[in-house]
Image: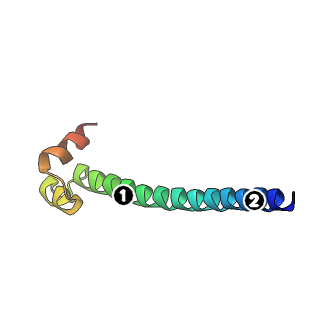
């Protein structure tokens, strides 16, 4: 009986720790994706304002000019 309680308690603690880690990883991933999306929108905006060229922006973002210009059309 005490052993069953200990196993159940350990299982509950393991689940709780797993959820906490999952939430932390999800938040961190969201931050990274948000920064990347913000960077993309900043480059798109600067190209639309003729501050930067599509060639420069696409190079900085690690994509082809065609890929970048397709995003400009959206």
Labels 1 & 2 near each other (Cβ < 8 A): no
At 83% across and 58% down in the image, what residue appears?
5
Q: Nearer the viewer, mark 1 or mark 2?
A: 2
Earlier residue among tags 1 and 2:
2
Residue 71's place in the image compared with 30, above or below, is above
Residue 65 relative to residue 74: left or right: left
Bin the neighbour count of mark 1 within 10 Å (Cα to Cα): few under 14, some 14-19, many 20 and up. few
Quadrant housing residue 1: bottom right
Disc 2 residue crowd, few under 14, some 14–19, many 20+, Cα 10 Å = few
Q: Is 59 on the left-hand or right-hand side of 48?
A: left
* Mark seen at residue 1: none
Q: Is 17 or 72 nearer to us in this picture?
A: 17
Q: Against 37, is 74 above or below?
A: above
Q: Position of residue 4 (x, y in %)?
A: 81, 56
The C terminus sits in image quarter: top left
Residue underneath mark 2:
7
- Residue at left offset 67%, top offset 60%: 14
Percent across and percent down for residue 70 are: 20, 40
* Extreme-right residue of the structure: 1
How are the residues colored?
rainbow
In the foreground, 53 or 22: 22
Name the one closer to the observer, 51 or 13.
13
Residue with the mark numbered 1 = 36
The answer for how far apart the CA atoms under marks 1 and 2 are is: 43 Å
Asked which secondary structure carries label 2, the reply is helix
Tally the marks. 2
Residue at 24% over, 43% down: 72
Q: Where residue 57 appears, x then y in whole percent? A: 20, 58
Q: Secondary structure at mark 1?
A: helix
Estimate the x, y position of residue 23 in percent, counting from the top left.
59, 57
């Amino acid at each position: 009986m005490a052993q069953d309680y200990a196993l159940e308690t350990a299982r509950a603690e393991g689940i709780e720790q797993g959820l906490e880690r999952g939430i932390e990883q999800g938040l961190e991933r969201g931050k990274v994706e948000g920064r990347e999306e913000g960077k993309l929108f900043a480059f798109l905006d600067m190209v639309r304002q003729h501050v930067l060229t599509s060639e420069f922006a696409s190079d900085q973002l690690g994509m082809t000019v065609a890929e970048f210009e397709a995003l400009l059309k959206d």
